[in-house]
Image (tube, rainbow, N blue to C red):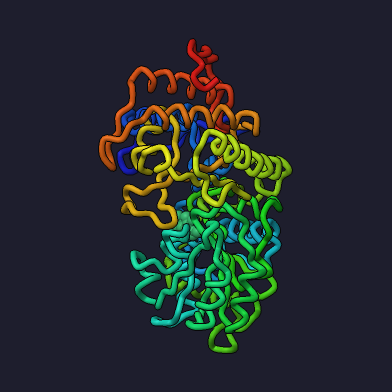
Amino acid sequence: MTRQPATGERAAHRSSSEGQQAALLRIGIGALQEADPELAQILDAEVQLQNSTLAMIASASIAAPSVLAAGGAALSNVTAEGYPGARYHPGAQQFDQVERLAVERAKLLFGAKYANVQPHSCSSANLAVFAALMKPGDVLMGLDLDAGGHLTHGSRASVSGRHYRPVPYGLDSSGRIDFAQLTDLVAEHRPRVLVAGASAYPRTVDFARFREIADSVGAYLLADISHIAGLVAAGRHPNPIDLAHVTTTSTYKQLGGPRGGLILSGREFETPGPDGRTPLHQLMQRAVFPQSQGTPSPATIAAKARAFANASEPAFRETARLIVRNARALANELSALGYRILTGGTDNHMVLIDVTSVGLTGVTAERALEECGILANRNRIPGDTKPPLITSGLRLGTNILAQRGMGPDEMSTCARLLHTVLSATSTVSDTDYRIDPSLVAEVRDEVRWVCARHPLPIVVPGPPVPAPLTGVGA
Ligand SMILES: *Cc1c(COP(=O)(O)O)cnc(C)c1O
């Protein structure tokens, strides 16, 4: 490989059929392995880890190879503030095309009239929307963090709860959004912005009902669909685009996209903002740039464009269907095994369980499962008596199980594996647990085998993994 001192690595040798970008990615990986084997080895091991681990992380999905490749494009080298056709730097011709493509695809996917693909995350998207619609001290209402809301919905731990006056709403005794309480709180506190959306809520969000309540006091409704964006795109959850004034989402959670956020608006895109004249779409554009972000991430936006196209394919809709069916099956299986399922079941991709019913804390359950190759994260549950790093709940999600091609039939295996670990774990303290090492080894073998039979779409098939001798979860 040619080396030139000024820049270190140089891309060289491209076969005639290979495009420049493809050659760059290939050569880049070669250079990484040669120049930095330490880093290359860690990144390689990560692919293996993802493939051989049973991830039931509700806030994650697997980005397709084409999404990852687009995210690694040389387009990343473009620095251009502003929007397509109105940049503050030269040299953005290709980037303009890519951003327009991403915007058009996002609009098409969600049936929106306006899309901003620049937010670096959904947190920054939410904060931008708030800054556009509220003055410091205005009332912001969101689902309480302990009830499953997100930090940016007015938690005191986030600037959203300090710059604005947060009034959280909660859940009723069945674990569902308490609309009676919400109606009263809205009438009393007259929020400027009402947020509908959650990070830990296994039930359908009734956006129409939220809109009625927002309208009763002239509040703006923000639908935050971070967790359910894939189901919304696939028609497996009601679409809030035309019900909310503004909708936000992460692009990596259920959309199989890169890290990032997205702001959308439908029928209300030209509705005036708080000044009574500036339309919402204009407010949102300014809210992202220049008010809260500098340069966008061009290759990430290319990856978003790719992910939005993927998400409009029939295969994505089929995966979304499986996600929901799997979650129901998993909830049923776990319920039959004696676990307390919050709200008694699920409508989406998520199953929340109370692990105190098996004598564990959220963190001991999470750690014991991870030791066995199963990923699910601790989660606070309504009325939780444990602090946020400990918790009493566990949040399971079926996004990645469905992406592996697993269906409801495989959920009994997943439930049994979970139960095998959780029932064999004993608590030493809130954070410490004990589990028999030979059981850990058995479950790990079983997990590896299950994963090998359902490889992730990012893995190149390798030699077959032998079936485990002891089928603990078979
Ligand atoms: C995860 C999440 C966010 C934040 O998303 P990031 O892109 O990680 O910043 C915002 N809102 C909800 C409801 C979420 O679940």
State the image coordinates of residue 464 (x, y, percent, origin top left): 54, 14
Residue 106: which quarter of the image? bottom right
Q: Is residue 194 left or right of residue 378?
A: right
Question: Which quarter of the image is occupied by the C terminus?
Answer: top right
Question: Which quarter of the image is occupied by the N terminus?
Answer: top left
Q: Residue at x 33, y 20 (%)?
A: 437
Q: Is residue 277 visible?
A: yes
Q: Residue at x 35, y 42 (%)?
A: 361
Vertical order, 114 against 299 (above or below):
below
- In the image, 139 versus 31, the foreground residue is 139
Q: Residue at x 56, y 43 (%)?
A: 67
State the image coordinates of residue 123 (x, y, percent, origin top left): 45, 62
Vertical order, 56 against 305 (above or below):
above
State the image coordinates of residue 75 (x, y, percent, origin top left): 51, 51
Residue 441: which quarter of the image? top left
Vertical order, 439 against 135 (above or below):
above
